[in-house]
Amino acid sequence: MTREVEHTADGRWIVVDGRRWRTQDPQLPDDVREQLLHHLGVGRSGVRTAKKAGDDDAVRAARARVQAAKTGLGERGTAWWEQSDDERRTRWEDALTELAALD
């Protein structure tokens, strides 16, 4: 099943099934985006696995990984278009540092 994704004219949002979601920061370097998306996938997988196992601590840890990755991507926290270039860089660098500590 493929969902239709539309982008708003300003490029800040995508719309999926009528619901608006913030897009990733377009200023992210490709290698940073790849790392953050990897952590996001690991986190989401961890949430599923921990829920099946009934491990609440592991669910919390996996959700923290998802939160850090999504913040680094610019999808959560202060909107990337409201941040300076330095603030945006600091956001994704801090997220990668936090995620490295979770490994």
Image (cartoon, grey):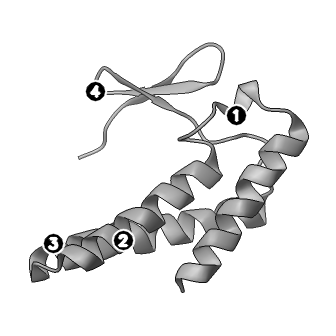
- Name the residue at the front extreme: 57
Other-residue count near label 4 (Cα within 10 Å), few / some / many at <14 / 14–19 / ≥20: few
What is the three-letter code of the residue carrying label 4? Asp
In terms of sequence position, does the residue under pointer 2 or pointer 4 come before the other? Answer: 4
- Name the residue at the bottom extreme: 103
Q: Which residue is mark 3?
A: 51
Q: Is residue 53 above or below residue 71?
A: below
Q: Is residue 87 above or below residue 93?
A: above
Q: Position of residue 11 (x, y in %)?
A: 64, 23
Tag of residue 17: 4
In terms of sequence position, does the residue under pointer 2 or pointer 1 come before the other? Answer: 2
Secondary element at tag 4: loop
- Rounded to the nearest whole Å, what is the CA distance between mark 2 and mark 1? 24 Å
Mark whose residue sits in front, 1 or 4:
1
Mark whose residue sits in front, 2 or 4:
2
Secondary element at tag 2: helix
Q: Position of residue 94 (x, y in %)?
A: 72, 61
- Rounded to the nearest whole Å, what is the CA distance between mark 1 and mark 4? 23 Å
Q: Position of residue 25 (x, y in %)?
A: 69, 41
Please say whether residue 41 is visible from this viewpoint: yes
Tag of residue 62: 2
